[in-house]
Amino acid sequence: MTNPLLADWDTPFHIAPFDRISDDDFAPAFEEALSAHLREIDAIANNPEPPSFANTIEAMEGAGEALDKVLSVFFSVAGADSNPERQALQRDFSPKLAAHSSAIYANETLFARIADLWARRDRLGLSEEEARVLYLTHRGFVRAGAALEGAEAERMKAVKSRLAVLGTSFTQNLLKDEADWFMPLAEADLEGLPGFVVDAARAAGEALEQDGPVVTLSRSLIVPFLQFSPRRDLREKAFRAWAARGENGGETDNREIAAEVLALREERAKLLGYPDFAHFKLETEMAGTPERVRELLMQVWQPAKAQALRDQAEMEEMLRDDGVNDALQPWDWRYYAEKRRRASYDLDESELKPYLQLDRMIEAAFTCANRLFGLDFAPLDVPLYHPDCRAWEVKRNGEHLAVFIGDYFARASKRSGAWCSAMRSQAKRPRVETPVVINVCNFSKPSQGKPALLSYDDARTLFHEFGHALHQMLSDVEFGSVSGTSVARDFVELPSQLYEHWLEVPEVLEEFATHAETGAAMPKALLDKVLAAATFDMGFQTVEYVASALVDLEFHSGAAPADPMAKQAEVLQGIGMPQAITMRHATPHFAHVFAGDGYSSGYYSYMWSEVMDADAFAAFEEAGGAFDPETAHKLEEFILSKGGSREAEELYTAFRGRMPGVEALLKGRGLVA
């Protein structure tokens, strides 16, 4: 029988036929697709015709279709619905993929054709996008080590293969630590918790087949527990487990993996002639150099730290008022911050949460996309990889544009966090492809028969990931290698962070923030409090983020630390980290940095993008409102549709007329008077 992963997909919009695919299909399909891709690459490299853009670069763009299909399915399920079989396959695939990539980049005949085209680029009559794709292809080969020879070339292959293995191990260790830990709660332990937290704890207990409610390490459960539980001993136990992910000793400990990853990254950079990994990595980003990143982060650090320390002093008074003779600890911060919020704004999250129904927030995200870009969303009844997944067809002016899949609920088989990925990216050449885009989140699943309710942070996450999805779905370029989110890492978060602003548009909340039981709209008094509290506790949020970004940057600047935990402590001491706040992602569970190269030396990019997103939303406000059609058209024309077909700074300047400074970010975070 034909392997369903390799067959033609006779499904609506050629979505993967998940109902026909079993775990047994992945390995044989993977091996065949790898071989097919190498045959295609060899045919391109050994083409007897002189190199041209069409027979080399465009041909490379079209190669590997079978491999793309296999990997898009596999990595979707491996991240969102893992099991022991898929984890074993991932450990097997990672070094083979690294070797496959190395084999392509080390193909001297192929690189000679690319280098020949690069040398003649001004005489080829290329379009702007063709020239960009040639530039990125040539640069990618050089940065991958295509110009290395002999022992250095062999060592580069070995380094990249080992890094792939380590990234997979880091991820799987973290998933196991998160899946294995839970804290049973007796009925007395539920005292003081709002109903939605109790419901989430009971649902988590049901999912883990326990006799009663539990707290797990899912962010959507543990954060509200830390916010609302008056039991300081239970908060401490839960927080310590959350903070210790990847640092528990034994087989799942990630500390030695982190050290080896950093050493290998430094070696990789030096093989290519860079002083350290940060200089190598940042060369292709908007920031350009570690110095510019450090300057931005420190500009934000000082006002954020000052605000956090003022807030800490207030909360220590509250702690003493509760009869606790101790300094404020990390497991206390969220609990007393929630008390401060109620006191300062008369805002109680348990009062707010019934108005933030998952289905209504999805509808809000869709409606904003309709008003801004004319998109329509219709539910699709197609088999997907998990019963919790949902799909929609996306149209504009009656024409098919994309398929959007949402996978919103936390489960033990899903890695933590939230992300957007494209199972298929938009392209026009060498064949027309329409996008299939997935948003994956980790919201608490409700008990049977109850609506799913979100925290305000959850709702913001939903809008954030949908902003990434819009970047994929509105892509309108020729080649897949520059479509959608294929942009500089410190530009990729602009569309996602910008879209978060529409959640705070009063008319959006007025229409879609309706009570789960009564259907009533959020009262204006509550809405006003929500918007007034938008920058509440921003000192804490900024400090925990910037500390993580600075540690990441210093890990990769200069010599790799032999002991990353000691280096982490050194950096935090150097910047005067408040003792009551921890890094958002401590080293042993810093998946952004150690699960792969994506955000390594690049965790700062959220803040770099925020400088632009604050300024970009101001463009709408200056034009008369959040749904100004001319500004929305410019946003799509110059940013969302262009992908990586032009330099990021050029695209932003085309949209806004200039690059912004840090002032809008500080104002947006409430860190300036």
Image (cartoon, rainbow, N blue to C red):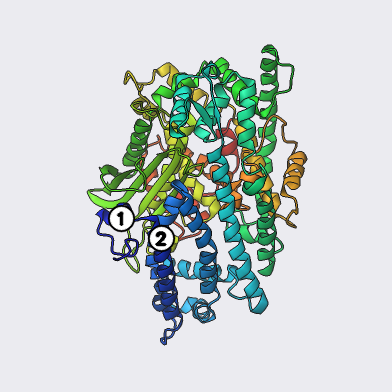
Q: Are marks 1 and 2 in contact (CB under 8 Å)?
A: no
| Side (left or right) of 15 relative to 89 | left
Quadrant position of residue 478: bottom left
| Amino acid on which the number 1 mark rests in the picture | Arg
Question: Which corner quadrant holds the C terminus?
Answer: top right
Quadrant position of residue 480: bottom left
* Residue 273 numbered tag: none
Residue 656 image offset from top left, x and y in percent: 48, 47
In the displayed structure, 351 sits above or below 22; it is above
Residue at (36%, 48%) from the top-left corner? 385
Say what secondary structure mark 2 lies in: helix
Q: Nearer the viewer, residue 437 or 21?
A: 21
Q: Which residue is identified by label 1? A: 20
Q: Is residue 542 visible?
A: no
* Cα distance in 3D space between marks 1 and 2: 12 Å
Residue 169 image offset from top left, x and y in percent: 58, 53
Residue at (30%, 55%) from the top-left corner? 20
Q: Which residue is identified by label 2? A: 26
Q: Nearer the viewer, residue 157 or 492?
A: 157
In the displayed structure, 431 sits above or below 222; it is below
Residue 191 image offset from top left, x and y in percent: 53, 16
| Side (left or right) of 401 relative to 342 | left
